[in-house]
Image (cartoon, grey):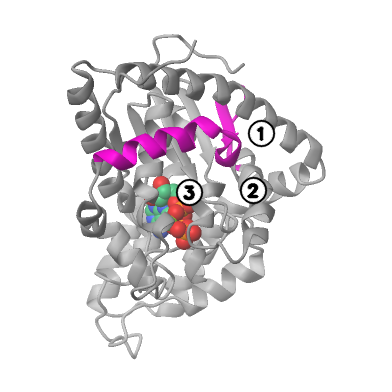
Amino acid sequence: MPHCENFAPIILTGDRPTGPLHLGHYVGTLKNRVAMQRSHRQFVLIADAQGLTDNADNPDRIRRNVIEVCLDYLAVGVDPAYTTICLQSSLSALNELTLFYLNYVTVARLERNPTIKDEIRTRGFGRDIPAGFLCYPVAQAADITAFKATVVPVGDDQVPIIEQTNEIVRRINRQAAREVLPEAKAVVPKIGRLPSIDGEGKMSKSQGNAIYLSASRHEIGTAVRRMYTDPGHLRISDPGKVEGNVVFTYLDAFDPDVDAVADLKASYRHGGLGDIALKQRLEQVLETLITPIRERRAELSRRPDDVIDVLRQGTQTSRIVTQQTLEELREALGLFILA
Ligand code: ATP
Ligand code: MG
């Protein structure tokens, strides 16, 4: 059982095992998870059931990536001594909560969710939207509330999902005439959405535009060379645009030397700094960040049984917590309880 104070605020956060984790996860949420794990009671959910909502024809992809995501957690410093890591599809209470919560949300409301709208477009569902996909924010409300989480460190694409969660929480509390469930607050970092390397939309596992935390030196170099800069910046001496220039967005996110980045921006705007030099700096910065993660990951992947043990133990602990909430909810909604 991880170390924690009983009164520590509870965190629930997680990832879909649709692929290994990338730099977007790192800035968007992993960094916060590592920073907050000692001051909070933290649960991290590998959301494999949610991963199936747009991968029903490829469950093998989801199954394979459970361990990959778990390896990424451990490699960046999510520590099982402080954080409970668990597997969504092994926690049946989450499904039962989802079924109750579906009655406290309308289809029209689900269709208005801006993140869902955007994801439906990028996944090319057209009118053939899997019902499970449209409803995943309700399942996510079940995940968050089952742990009674009040803090959710996420990228900014998740903010509308947390709002949806809180609407459900308020409706249930109103129905029960007492506060059965707490509302949750999204904790979004300054760079809440890392763009993809081509500057089109966010970096995402499902869109093949990511730099993974397990990337080799060669893969980092290839991705950085493909990065979108300023198409109007043809000669080194030309003034260039910093806004919307993906290389600068990444330097802002990952380069610890803020003053040096400010100087680079000034000389790029003025003219005299070439894209190649700029990209070489970014490549170095990313290499410095990723190398220790990649090495720890390689070491851990030689002990897959230990990784599975972490997940098994975390899931057992989480089963008790989520089952307890389910029982409280049944009672609060006034269901017939068979003794
Ligand atoms: P998929 O494409 O399968 O949806 P994903 O790359 O969007 O995968 P998720 O598992 O959906 O990753 O997201 C997990 C967490 O990582 C969420 O908190 C999300 O906000 C955050 N996150 C994902 N991509 C980014 C990004 N590009 N920038 C910042 N945060 C991100
Ligand atoms: Mg996503």
Q: Earlier in the sequence, mark 3 or mark 1?
A: 3
Q: Nearer the viewer, residue 147 or 284?
A: 147
Q: Which residue is mark 2?
A: 66
Q: Which residue is mark 3?
A: 26
Residue 189: x %, y % from top left: 32, 44
Where does the magenta region start and end? 76-104
User: Is there a contact, CB below 8 Å, between mark 1 and mark 2?
Assistant: yes
Q: Earlier in the sequence, mark 1 or mark 2?
A: 2
Q: Nearer the viewer, residue 231 or 31?
A: 31
**Left or right: 23 as drawn, with respect to 171:** right
Residue type at mark 3 is Tyr
Q: Is residue 27 visible?
A: no
Q: Which residue is mark 1?
A: 311
Element at badge 2? helix
Q: Nearer the viewer, residue 172 or 33?
A: 172
Q: Is residue 54 visible?
A: yes
Q: Nearer the viewer, residue 233 or 298?
A: 298
Element at badge 3? helix
**Left or right: 228 as drawn, with respect to 15:** left
Q: Nearer the viewer, mark 3 or mark 1?
A: 1
Q: Nearer the viewer, mark 3 or mark 2?
A: 2
Q: CA distance from mark 1 to mark 2?
A: 10 Å
Residue 126: x %, y % from top left: 35, 76
